[in-house]
Each structure stands twice: as C-alpha cells, then as structure tokens.
C-alpha cells in the first residue's frame, strides 16, 4: 500500500514574504495572489512563521471606533505586539509549524489538528522551503475514483497483504464508502482487514459483513458459515 505524500499534494510555487516586508506590501501580496496567508522566510529561505489575514486584522481591531459603538478589545501582550507591528516578522504567527515532503496525509492532518493551523510549509532536511500544503490540498485524496480505491483494496490489501483469494472477500465502493462481504477463515482477520481498508487513501468509511469459519479469538461461538 502506497499513500500519497505531501510532495505530491503541496503547492510548489509558494507565495512568500521576506521578514522585512512592510504591512501594506503584505496586504497587497495576499490580494494579488488571492491567498489568505503566506509563510515568512529568512535570508536562507527557511520559514520563520506564517502571516495571515487574521494576523493583519489585529491592527484594525486595535483601532478606536470613530462612532464609539465598538469598544477597543482587550489584547494580550503578544497580541498587542502584533497589532503594533509594521513588518512581516513582527506580524507573523511564529514559530512556523512545518512538515516534510515524505509525510502522508494522515501525518499532516494530525499535525494541523494538534497545532490548530490551516496550512503547513513543507521543508527539506536543511529546513529550506519546498512548498506549502493546505487543508484543501489534504482533502483532495477524497476525490479519488471509486474504482481506484476498489483496485487497491482488492490487490494490495486483500491479495498481497492478507493473502486472500479474490473469491473470499467482495469489495464494493461508492462515493468512498467501502462495503466488504464474503467469508474468511479466522475471526481475528476481520478487524485487521477493516483497519487496513480504512487506511487506504480516499476511503470515507468501511462497512464489513464478513463471515468467518473459525473463531480463534476465544469469543462467543461463530454464527457465520
């Protein structure tokens, strides 16, 4: 089984900002390229952080409302520093949370979730910027064709990995939902097959209706044929 890596999904032509880029130039950069954030890089093209529309809007939020209807919000010290910043390195969220090109979608998605970020600069072994991957890029694996998913499950999961004959387990895939039928020798194989199928790129969910001939788990007696 081969999972798509970030090197296949990432954007290589990265819109980026130098550390000394002024506030207005950052706004113009975002608008010109129709993006909501850019990595900020040092002189060696290594990501230092990411500056986003949310970072820039802190400056507007810190301004007094001429009408007097909206009070100036309380800002923490780090938020105040950003609101008062004028260059990319002062405005960015840092340090940059980065990924490696050989990572899978699962690895990148878990990092995004734990770090609460929407995008990851992708760097090489020297921490130089190679590309950037967004949540939308990761979701592209779910556009994979059903027949490609079915072929991978049939050939890679069932035949090569589990050493099962094609006649033992049937596989149907519709809109990324996998339905498994048939019968296997041992009950203990069923959760293994289900777990491997769930790990295939593009799979949304797995429903198994597998029978077994021998209960090797010490559980309740088999009711399947």
Image (tube, rainbow, N blue to C red):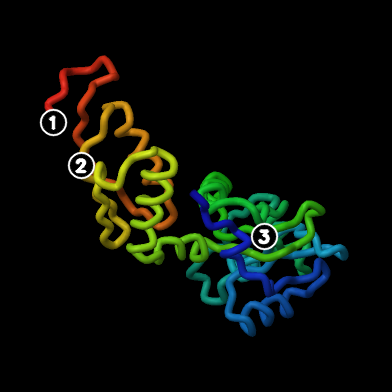
| Count of numbered circles in the view | 3
Quarter the C terminus occupies: top left
Q: Is residue 129 above or below residue 217?
A: below
Residue 26 lies, in percent from the top left, at: 71, 75
Between marks 3 and 1 in the image, the one whose residue lies nearer the viewer: 1
Give the alpha-carbon distance from disc 3 to disc 1, as whole Å.
Answer: 52 Å
User: Which residue is label 2 attached to?
Assistant: 182
Residue 196 lies, in percent from the top left, at: 40, 42
User: Which residue is label 3 attached to?
Assistant: 121
Q: Residue at x 82, y 53 (%)?
A: 126
Q: N-terminal of the two: label 2 or label 3?
A: 3
Q: Is residue 65 above or below residue 189?
A: below
User: Which residue is label 1 attached to?
Assistant: 225
- Please state which of residues 184 and 11 is positioned toward the viewer in this rendering: 184
Q: Is residue 83 above or below residue 208?
A: below
Residue 43 lies, in percent from the top left, at: 87, 65
Q: N-terminal of the two: label 1 or label 2?
A: 2
Q: Residue at x 29, y 47 (%)?
A: 166
């Amino acid at each position: 089984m081969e999972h798509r890596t970030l090197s296949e999904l990432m954007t290589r032509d990265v819109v980026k900002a130098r550390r000394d880029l002024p506030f207005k130039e950052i706004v113009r950069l975002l608008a010109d390229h129709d993006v909501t954030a850019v990595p900020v890089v040092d002189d060696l093209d290594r990501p230092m952080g990411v500056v986003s529309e949310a970072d820039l809007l802190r400056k507007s939020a810190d301004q007094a409302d001429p009408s007097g209807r909206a009070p100036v919000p309380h800002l923490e010290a780090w938020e105040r520093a950003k609101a008062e910043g004028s260059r990319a390195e002062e405005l960015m969220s840092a340090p940059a949370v980065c990924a490696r090109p050989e990572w899978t979608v699962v690895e990148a998605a878990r990092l995004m979730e734990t770090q609460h970020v929407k995008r990851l600069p992708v760097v090489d072994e020297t921490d130089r910027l190679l590309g950037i991957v967004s949540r939308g890029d990761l979701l592209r694996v779910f556009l994979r064709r059903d027949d490609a998913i079915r072929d991978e499950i049939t050939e890679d999961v069932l035949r090569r990995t589990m050493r099962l004959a094609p006649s033992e387990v049937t596989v149907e895939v519709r809109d990324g939902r996998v339905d498994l039928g048939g019968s296997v020798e041992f009950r203990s194989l069923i959760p293994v097959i289900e777990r491997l199928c769930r790990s295939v790129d593009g799979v949304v969910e797995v429903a198994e209706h597998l029978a077994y001939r021998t209960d090797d788990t010490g559980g309740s007696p088999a009711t399947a044929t």
